[in-house]
């Protein structure tokens, strides 16, 4: 089972009992999906 949580730095992290944790590496390598979305919204004046 995989759990999702927030790191002390505010980043979303995943942990659980898995033979390999590719999700953990992918999530930790990306700060958060929010900044790009906010930047994209602000990039559209209309």
Image: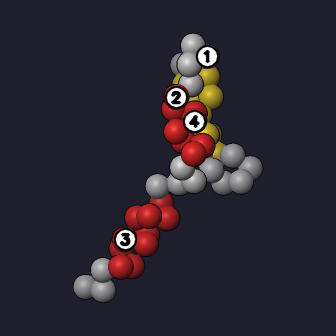
**Image coords of residue 34 (percent x, y):** 48, 60
> Contact, CB < 8 Å: mark 3 with mark 4?
no
Pointer 4 residue: 25
Q: CA distance from mark 2 to mark 3?
A: 27 Å
User: Is residue 43 positioned above or below 26 on the image?
Assistant: below
Pointer 3 residue: 40
Disc nearest the viewer among 1 and 4: 4
Secondary structure of residue under mark 4: helix
Q: CA distance from mark 4 to mark 2?
A: 5 Å
User: Is residue 33 positioned above or below 40 on the image?
Assistant: above
Secondary structure of residue under mark 1: loop
Pointer 2 residue: 22
Q: CA distance from mark 1 to mark 4?
A: 14 Å
Q: CA distance from mark 3 to mark 4?
A: 25 Å
**Image coords of residue 22 (percent x, y):** 52, 28
Residue 41 shown left or right of residue 8 in the figure:
left
Secondary structure of residue under mark 3: helix
The circle drawn on residue 45 is none
How many residues crowd mark 3 within 10 Å: few (<14), some (14–19), many (20+)? few
Give the residue at the far top of this rendering.
Answer: 19
């Amino acid at each position: 089972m995989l759990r999702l949580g927030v790191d002390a730095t505010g980043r979303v992290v995943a942990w659980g009992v898995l033979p390999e944790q590719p999700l953990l590496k992918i999530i930790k390598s990306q700060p958060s999906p929010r900044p790009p979305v906010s930047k994209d919204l602000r990039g559209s004046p209309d």
